[in-house]
Amino acid sequence: MEKKAKIKIAITIASLAAISILFTRQQRRRRKLNQCPQYSCYLQSEPKPQHNFKRVLADNSYSPFKHANKEKSSGSHPYELEITALLENPRPEFDFSNVDLDLQRSDSFVWVETKSQLNELANALSKEIFFAVDTEQHSQRSFLGFTALIQISTEKEDYLVDTIALHDEISILQPFFADPGVCKVFHGSDNDVLWLQRDFHIYVVNLFDTAKACEVLSKPQKSLAYLLETYCGVATNKFLQREDWRQRPLPAEMLQYAQTDAHYLLYIAKCLVAELKQQGNENSYCPDDKFNFVLEASRRSNMVCLQVYTKEIESYPGEAAASSIFFRLLNGQGGVSSISSVTQDLVRRLCAWRDLMARVHDESLRFVLSDQAIIALANKAPANPTDVYTTIAQADSDVDCLNLSSSLPSPSPVVCSHLDDVEHQVCNNVENLDDILLANLQKCLGPNGSCPLSVFNYVLPAKSNWELKNQSHKFVYKQNGIKVSRQVAKKASRDLFVQKFSCKSPVYHNCRIYANDGRLLCYCDRKKLEWYLTRDLAKLVEDNPPAIMLLFEPKGRPEDEGNEFYIQSKKNICVGCGEGNHYLRYRIIPSCYRIHFPEQLKSHRSHDIVLLCVDCHEVAHAAAEKYKKQISAEFGIPLFIHKVADSRKAEARPGFSASITNFEEAGVSPLQLRTAAMALLHHGPTMPSNRREELRRIVMRYYGGREISEEDLERALLVGMSPRERRRHAKKRGLSLKMSKPTDFPDRQQDSYPAVMVESATMDATKADNVLGLHAIETQKSDEKEGRSSLTESHESKPPTCSNGRIDQLVFSTIWKKMNSTSKVSDSKDDSVGNVDDECENSSVQNGFGSSSPTPNSKVSLLGHGPHGKQVVDYLLREYGEDGIRQFCRRWRQVFVEALHPHFLPAGWDVMHSGRREFGEFSVYNPAKKPADDGAAEINKMHH
């Protein structure tokens, strides 16, 4: 009884405590709401350290970032010539042999906070041939972020440079960072290089990155913490990296952390260079083939220097964030297929407002208003400021219960200062969003604005800046009724192309996925992250940028599979020139080949998909088209289907062979056929009679020489189209799909390849025997002995067809006649039939040479390079297996590199990338689970 009484008392006390906590929290919220200034910005009484800067190079406007101008600079990077020279003619060695550092770190360092102290540091650096550098950033209370501290270490001294106090004077150090005769040692310099450009126009030339050296040496880890512990026996607290580096004075613990990060870098570099040299000696079998590991580390490091900082500007404020939130809403509503237009509009308005307020107040998006709060506002649509405040606080409170590390105020001071604006966004769905944002901007930064102007936001109210963001899609092609010059029109056309086809939001979100043992698995976008979270397969471990840890054991690790590319962060810029204002996805391996790869070699493989600006895309595409012609010549597989013919119409007409002779040859190019049919349908009655007759003869060749009707022209338009192209065409023209007779695809002229006259016209007669195993020459001889043509015999035994309501079923007709003994083939009467309709069954019977006849992909258009790509891939799989595909990919990567000389490829990208990947037992991409549904799959199974 006494025990039960004690339990009751404990429960009562706990209940009272919980009630008391809830009551106290509610009281605090009400008190804060009452005290919250509605019309006065919090920045009036809470100035921020960065507001003391006299000038900034990267403001919060929508204008692109301007880099430093330098004489003799040919590209966007002012020091491109110097860095390129280092890449082409690298210095023979990094001489760290004389580095003599005391591993017992002293607590003494030089704190640099005045201009005179900065000049003394410049004096000291002028005598050095190498020095170590690290930076500390602050991003939570800044829109773009800024450098709060620079650590520089020489052999004799450690310097901590207060870049907040000296922000406008740091340019004194520019010459030392840009001097190619001085080596700068960083660790993980990808971001540091860009931050120094953004804040101070400091460009790093001649860099040694210890992380890149770890890559070359294939270290199990490449973090600085790992290197400090391995080589120096020093442990650091990396959580301090996320602390507020704006605070002054900095606590002793943070000062020690900052000093440690740079102090040991020179010694670590010395150790790594020694290992690189040793590795080179051990792997040197022939002096001529010696791979210089040191120079490779140098090359990878200096490639980082070629990066240029760019602002990520969306096509509309907050668009990327809104798209991410829509995905969350869909999953939160049980996977519904759509979101109401009202909810969509509200989310877009709130995201756009948040983006604008973050720029005005120089705050991060997360600080202004969390995604969870936007979702809550969209779901509840509160009707007054009090409800708005309570909704936001409750949403953030629910999240904070799961993430105890969150320390952001909720609602934020920005929301408290502009509660009426938030309410206006939620309640007013009539006004145009542009007008609302402009009104908010004027209210904040106008003549009587409530928010203080700063070097970060003073450009925002300018009309020209706003027009640059929202009116970029408007182009004027005439001036005063007179056409503009061709150059101006070309530029306008290019800009319109960029506006229409470039990526509308960042492609790389750089979210991270960790294994359950803490090892990094990959970087990914938010959708993939949310897929795991919504299925309770992972837990959120970081917010900005988001990171999750899997709750199950994944199959393999990227570094174990040689795929380090997937554990590198990536920038949303053109990999060729660094352009960041627009970019398009570019497939290094052309789709006509890649679509036919085995699933395990292409699924979830993004190594060969990069971002390019329009100009670089044009150069790369031209090089790819040129190389396709080389592939075509090498394999003897033409790029296009050369001839198509309506075999059924030909069969139904007596004397078909004679009609072919009258019309020079059977069949016509699919593209030529389509063009002729379209011209006759649209302009036949009005075009000159001789031209009309010429086009009619082209179409008649397809139908075997008979007269044609308007229905025949309609059918001819669909020849060679993929099912998807047919549906688009039918929808555009308002046509109904009617059942039609199948179409065959003859090869080259009869005299050059008579045995396969009515087969797919993708094989060169001189090489077909080698590539696809069709013994054309011997077949021809046997036919001549029997005194009949292969064409005639191919129609004596008609291939099976499938009628299921599809118009113009496209069938690859093969050699259906029984081959005689001189052909050295099997007893099989049927070689293969490939039908474009999904409902028709594909079959593949091997011939005597152990190969399969070409079978078309039902989703591939015959008007492009799809059939060519399939035959190339099938040949590679048959002859070399998956290794042949990997080698083929390496050739295309080399073409891309030689055409573009890309300076901004993501870390880990490699021409020799293997693409090898382990699949779990239940993975849909596991080859063991994938049934062989075509010839390529069957061949692949035979090789494995």
Image (cartoon, rainbow, N blue to C red):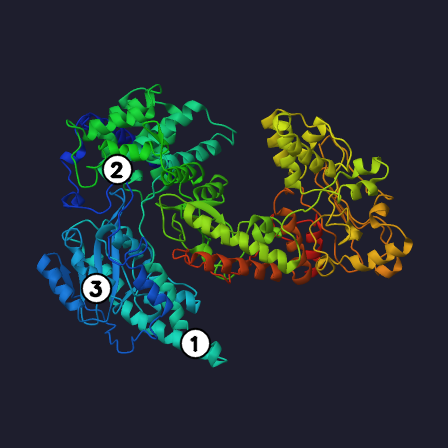
Q: Which of 505 and 706 is in front in this view?
A: 706
Q: What residue appears at the point 41 percent right and 25 percent down from the top-left corner?
A: 343
Image quadrant in which the N terminus is located: top left
Q: Could you classify mark 1 by the number of other residues whose Cα lies within 10 Å: few (under 14), some (14-19), or many (20 or more)?
A: some
Identify the residue under disc 1.
280
Q: Which of 184 and 394 is in front in this view?
A: 184
- Residue 4 versus residue 107 in the image, above or below: above
Looking at the image, is mark 3 or mark 2 earlier in the sequence? 3
Badge 3 marks a residue whose secondary structure is: helix
Position of residue 5 measured from the top left corner of the image (x, y, whole percent): 36, 35
- Residue 475 versus residue 266 in the image, above or below: above
The quarter holding residue 79 reads bottom left
Position of residue 168 measured from the top left corner of the image (x, y, whole percent): 15, 51
Separation of marks 1 and 3 at Cα, in angstroms: 31 Å
Residue 767 lies left or right of residue 404; in this view the side is right
The quarter holding residue 389 reads top left
Q: Could you classify mark 3 by the number of other residues whose Cα lies within 10 Å: few (under 14), some (14-19), or many (20 or more)?
A: many
Separation of marks 2 and 1 at Cα, in angstroms: 51 Å
Q: Could you classify mark 2 by the number of other residues whose Cα lies within 10 Å: few (under 14), some (14-19), or many (20 or more)?
A: many
Looking at the image, is mark 1 or mark 3 earlier in the sequence? 3
Identify the residue under disc 2.
359
Position of residue 751 measured from the top left corner of the image (x, y, whole percent): 77, 53
Badge 1 marks a residue whose secondary structure is: helix
Q: Which of 587 and 944 is in front in this view?
A: 587
Identified by mark 1, the residue type is Gly
Badge 2 marks a residue whose secondary structure is: helix
Identified by mark 3, the residue type is Phe
Identify the residue under disc 3.
176
Observer-side mark, 1 or 3, equals 3
Identified by mark 2, the residue type is Arg
